[in-house]
Amino acid sequence: MIKNDRQYRITKGQAERFAAAIASAAAKPNPRLHPTLRKAELAALKSQFDDLKSEIREYESLCSGKRRDIALASIEDLAKSLIQARIAAGLTQEDLAVKLGLKPQQIQRYEATSYRSASLERIHEVLRALGLELRHPATLRLVS
C-alpha cells in the first residue's frame, strides 16, 4: 500500500521500469530460455506491473477526495483503513502528527508497523483527528 507521496513517486518509477521490461521481453525474447519459461517470465512481469498499477490507482483515488467511504471488513483491516482515511482526508503523515501533538516520525512508525504499537486510546485519537465515524456495516466514513 502506498502511504505517502514519496512512495507514490517510487512506485510510479517502478511501474515505468516494469512496463519497459515487459515491452523489451515481448519485443526481444531471450532465445536461450525455453518458451514456457519465457511465457512464465512475461506473466510474472505483467502480474507485478498490474499490482503496482492497482496501488497507484488506489492512492490516486484516495488523493482525489472522491472516495469518502473506507471499508472495514475486519479489525485486521483497521491500520490500512486508518492510512486510507488519512490520505482521503488530504492529510500527510506530518499533518496528522500535528493534529495529535506528535512528531511525524511517530505517525511514520505507526503506519510502518500497522499501528501495532498504538494503544486503543491512541487509535481512538487518530479516528477523531481524521474526523471518522464507524457505521454499520463496518464502514468508516469521513464526516468533515
Image (cartoon, rainbow, N blue to C red):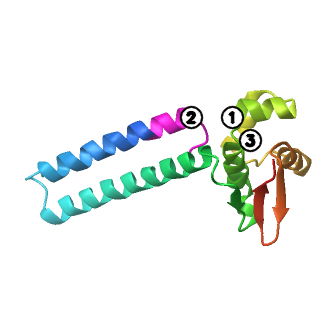
Q: Is residue 35 above or below residue 129?
A: below
Return the residue at label 1: 92
Label 2 residue SS: helix
Q: Which of marks 1 and 3 is nearer the N terminus?
A: 1
Q: What residue type is labelled 2?
A: Asp
Return the residue at label 3: 110
Return the residue at label 2: 5
Residue 17, percent across and down? 32, 40
Q: Which of marks 1 and 2 is nearer the N terminus?
A: 2
Label 3 residue SS: helix
Residue 9 on the magenta segment: yes
- Magenta stretch, main secondary structure class: helix
92 vs 135, left or right, is left
The image quarter in which residue 12 lies: top left
- Pointer 1 and pointer 3: residues touching (CB < 8 Å)? no
Disc 1/disc 2 C-alpha distance (Å): 9 Å
Q: Is residue 1 among what the camera can see?
A: no
Label 1 residue SS: loop
